[in-house]
Amino acid sequence: MTQVVVVGGGIAGLLTAVRLGERGHSVTLLEAQPQLGGMITSITVGDALVDAGAEAYAVRGGTVRALCDELGLAVAPPRGTSQLWWQHGSNPMATGVLGIPSSLDDPALEALSSDEYQLAAAEPQLDRAVGADSITLAELVRLRLGEAVLTKLVAPVTRGVYALSPEQMPLAEFAPQLLPKIAQTGSLIAAVAQLRGPGSAAVEQPVGGMFRLIEALRERFIAAGGTLHTNAAATRLERGASGITVCAADDLRFNANQLVLATAAQPAARLLATLGVELTPPPVRTIRSVILTAKKPEFAAHPIGSGAVVAEPDGVGAKAITHYSAKWSWAPEHVFRMTYPPHTRPTLEGAVGDLARLTGVPITAADITGFASLALESVPTRISPAERTAIREQASAAGVALVGAWLDGNGIAPAIAGVAQLLERDWVNSAPASAGDMPHTGSET
């Protein structure tokens, strides 16, 4: 029987454990934290159980929807419209890709002057070769739609969502389908329309929250006979005659014929170092947010729509705000989520001030029924394909497989792709056990 140990219970590790268990391997999953999920977690704020980490997934490609369907999870798109918040007021965010509109009738284009709009409106008549050699998102948008679309529509979105300027966003990584679609359709706006699809939402979530996906995968893993240990941080790896022993907290030891590390980069590097594999983990960034619940009748009018990206701070500390209750039909009223620059430490007083300024609703701390300040401190940055290949090869030479956001990219779809790549390995597809050897129920500690 192949004994597999998966270290790390985020989406990549949990899905890996599920797939290997369903293929007949004996799988033990170790998670350092009390709960599974990694960057997909839940929190109770006031009386509301909501997402503390990622709250939606990208619809593009259909891979995440397929997983939700497989797990029997109903999904729903967001309600309402998103805004760009400026000192003088708000205007709608473009319905498209990365702030690029999919139609010249998009209300977001009302933010442009007459001359700026005319420049953008001429884009479909440009030669399809214009911008074909663009490397970054900024270069492509500037060449085809003009500087105003870049600064007024695209840059606020990329800075608010990705904490990156369009100049820092290679098309090959963030929008690899745009250039081929322009070559096909002859227009950037037409390309975005095809990628987005008529009337379709760019994101959605399992009804009840993203954390429902983690709950469903955990149940699936246990049903497949897996063994789950939480509060079990792996501390070192020891090579043995038949594989690798994983040493964990509380003197726990787990023997693995095959080992999969699905942790963040730094823990993976520390564990690999105990086998003599020296890796320099890529840098990480912090995502800082605040969740507020409030009792205020004025919020029922959804004054900020489903949320807004702050395009012009003007004394506002938050980078973006989501009216969670307006965005997701199942959510209790009224839940707000605001993201902040990573170096800040938002307080209740500061968050209340930002909420009042962004929504236009007078509110004080007395109206707040719940407050949480959160930080995801190991969010990976992107690495090049060459770096990714080199890291995987180093680990593989030591008998260790790697999956996770720091290698595969942030988001559920990249996690699914990374797991699919692992499942192509020879040992995964070998016959691991006879029917009599297989466990019938899993366990959880």
Image (tube, grey):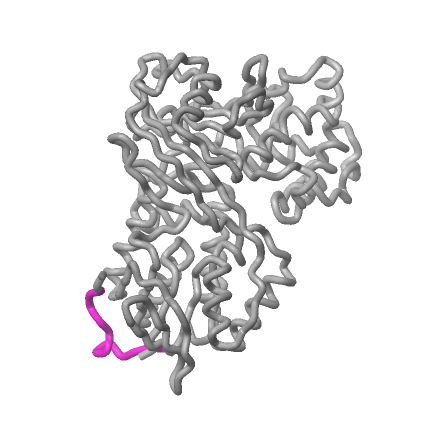
- Image position, residue 180 (x, y; %): 68, 44
Q: Quadrant of residue 238?
A: bottom left
Q: Quadrant of the N terminus?
A: bottom left
Q: Residue at x 20, y 68 (%)?
A: 440
Picture coordinates of residue 387, whole percent (x, y): 62, 62
Please determine whether, in this image, residue 378 is positioned above or below residue 110.
below
**What is the x, y in percent for residue 289?**
44, 36
| Quarter in which the C terminus is drawn | bottom left
Q: Residue at x 39, y 68 (%)?
A: 235
Is 255 left or right of 96, judged from the image as shown? left
Which residue is at a point 29% across and 53% down the rendered structure image? 34
Q: Nearer the viewer, residue 291 or 8?
A: 291
- The magenta stretch spans which residues? 431-442
Residue at left 56%, top 39%? 162
Q: Nearer the viewer, residue 281 or 51?
A: 281
Q: What secondary structure is the magenta-colored segment mainly?
A: loop
Residue 272 falls within the magenta-colored stretch: no
Choose between 29 and 219: the one closer to the eye: 29
Q: Quadrant of residue 76?
A: top left
How many numbered marks are there? Answer: 0
Residue 61 higher or lower than 417, as above or below? above
> Can residue 207 be seen in the rendering of this structure?
no
Asked if residue 157 lies left or right of residue 199, the reply is: right
Residue 140 location, quadrant: top right
Task: Using the rendered image of the protein, determine whether residue 230 is visible from the camera's viewpoint.
Answer: yes
Residue 127 position within the rendered picture, expressed as x and y whole percent measured from the top left: 79, 34
Left or right, residue 413 beside residue 165: left
Q: Tell which residue pokes out farthest to the bottom in this image.
A: 241
